[in-house]
Amino acid sequence: MTTTDIVTVGNRPRLENRPLRKILGRPEIGALVAALAVMLFFSVYTSTFMTLSGAGVWLESASTFGIMAVAVALLMIGGEFDLSAGVMTGFTALVVGILTSHYGLNIWVAAVISLVLALAIGAINGLLVMKTGLPSFIVTLGTFFVLAGIDLAVTKLITGQVAIQGMTSVPFYDTIQPLFGASIQIGGGTFYVSVLWWFVATAIATWVLLRTRAGNWIFAVGGELKSARQVGVPVLRTKIGLFMTTAAAAWLVGMISLFRTSTVQANTGVGQEFIYIICAVVGGCLLTGGFGSAIGAALGALIYGMVFQGITFAQWDTNWLRTFLGAMLLLAVFLNHFVRTRAGGSR
Amino acid sequence: MSATGTRPAVSEAAPIVEVTGIGKSYGPVNALSGVSTSVKAGEVTCVLGDNGAGKSTFIKILAGAHSPSEGEFLLDGKPVTFSSPRAALDAGIATVYQDLAVIPLMPVWRNFFLGSEITRGVGPFRRLDVGEMKKITYTELDNMGIDLRDVDQPIGTLSGGERQCVAIARAVYFGARVLILDEPTAALGVKQSGVVLKYIARARDRGLGVVFITHNPHHAYPVGDRFLLLNRGTSLGDFAKKDITLDELTSLMAGGAELESLAHELERTLGGSSPIVQQLEAEAERQPGRPDGGRPRRG
């Protein structure tokens, strides 16, 4: 970098040090405070919550939602929704289940085929949205119902049942199972490998968002599509990549649920797409795109897991979970709205 | 790795861009015809005209978004045809549109480098060089005379004038030799407009050729070196600053040509001796630069 041609050369950056204001401007700050509050509440209110066995339970519960919430957060920052994300977790598991238990295909090959199918569906979602210009909400609502129907109809057609059983007797099951379903005992608690996958997914997503060109492009296509296109951001590639990332995450979660329980229901994942969106929004993602964080979405999923299991530990009626989630969502949306009017105020 | 280039000799140099008798028609509709002007390094060429005068068509030709259907477009003395805005940009002609192409919620430095990010490392470890980009953003803005407290703040928190200036600084940094500004002061208040004019002068002093599109002669005159006046798709004249005063510019803008044709029209109905007609003719006589000031050369 030379600036020799310039008459007045600028001073060194006067990067101001206002840590408090910087921290309060982060998208995930609301979710962090809420997560700590929930954790504190159930730790005091129930005796089992803050033990190793309790933590194992709520971490496991949060992990699969966390992986999806992080992927969905990237997609939402990029300005799109994916309502087919929930049913895709069931679809990928069913593909592996049917190909192995019914057609006798090698389990590793079946897992790869399942991933390829998921990526293809993600790419189709992205292409449909970008080529037609229709809202992704509608397009993926369509793929959601198409897949939900296929899951039930095809499973019933081929197996005559609405669930895949007997996965454990499939050859080489033991070679792939630990990758997605392993667990270790620490103290009295059982900790699943899915928690590790969740942390890895969050770390990679955060790195991509904040430290790579792709991350810059994700914020840009979600923030102001036309401007992004004008400055040369590869808009189509970025958006399709985001849909494919969500699909890949759904495959990972599908594998985790398949190999943890060795069974899969034909309606697995239906209805969970909204929980992913709630986790992402609680974590600071704007519904309009262009703002949010992967760590925030992971915290949103942590809150979900803690409340879900905390309510069980407290021996309340678990139906209160939904009411709580709804209230959290409203609160988060109000908070986000405030942040947005502050940051984009002069528009 | 600086793209700012070296400062060229000012004023007496050959023009970077020169257009002669340029025009654009869409089928039978003539949007623009017979327009000639030049853009030199270190000078500001102002394009003035009312709404619908053909300003947008003219800048779209310069920016490479439209190819002209008549006339000659010379870049550094050689005829060129741009196939796309990208091609014009690669040749050093950058356009800052009214919507500025910024993402309001993204930090200033990310906006500055969007689409042309600096990275280091290889393979999966290829990452944004955040420190370097922040430093360059700060330095480039400082050189334009913009002292931002914090390049990390969302660009949406800046005022309209400041955002305009970030967009200008970005074009300058990424190697623009000719900067086309589409009505940069149109949406701004008096004070903010003054700030933007200051940055236009800064860009000029750094050796850029600036094309400044406006409908306000009071904004154009203080910074301009050359004034191209458009009206209904034709040129009313292309003047150097020494050949025209602000008053003449303003009255020309306000429709000197219309006054004359009005006089002719009234002459037919009222007769040439009518005092109103004589007054109008005298008024039209005082308009500068006509009739040789660039009447459209058709055919």
Image (cartoon, rainbow, N blue to C red):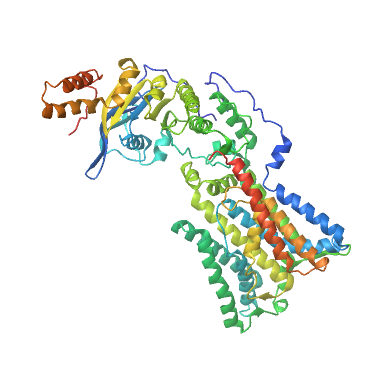
Q: How far from the left and from the top, in percent, is residue B6?
A: 48, 22
Location of residue A182 by image quarter: bottom right
Look at the image and tell me in which quarter the N terminus of chain A lies: top right
Compared to A14, does B128 lie above or below?
below
Q: Is residue A191 visible?
A: no
Quarter of the figure with residue A21? top right
Left or right, A6 with reference to B210: right
The reply, left or right, for residue A335 in relation to residue B115 is right
* Residue located 48% across and 37% down the image: B100
Task: Judge from the rendering whether residue B36 lies leftward or rightward of residue A15; answer left or right.
Answer: left
Image location (x, y in percent) of residue B201: 46, 22
Q: Which residue is drawn at 65% across and 34% down?
A: B131
Any part of residue A167 in sight: yes
In the rendered image, residue A322, in percent from the top left (x then y), is placed at 70, 65
Q: Using residue B53 as the reference point, say whether residue A146 is left or right of it.
A: right
Q: Is residue A62 above or below residue A163?
A: above
**In the orientation shown, which residue stands out farthest toward the top?**
B242
Note whether A318 is above or below B55 in the view shown: below
The residue sitting at 49% across, 32% down in the picture is: B164
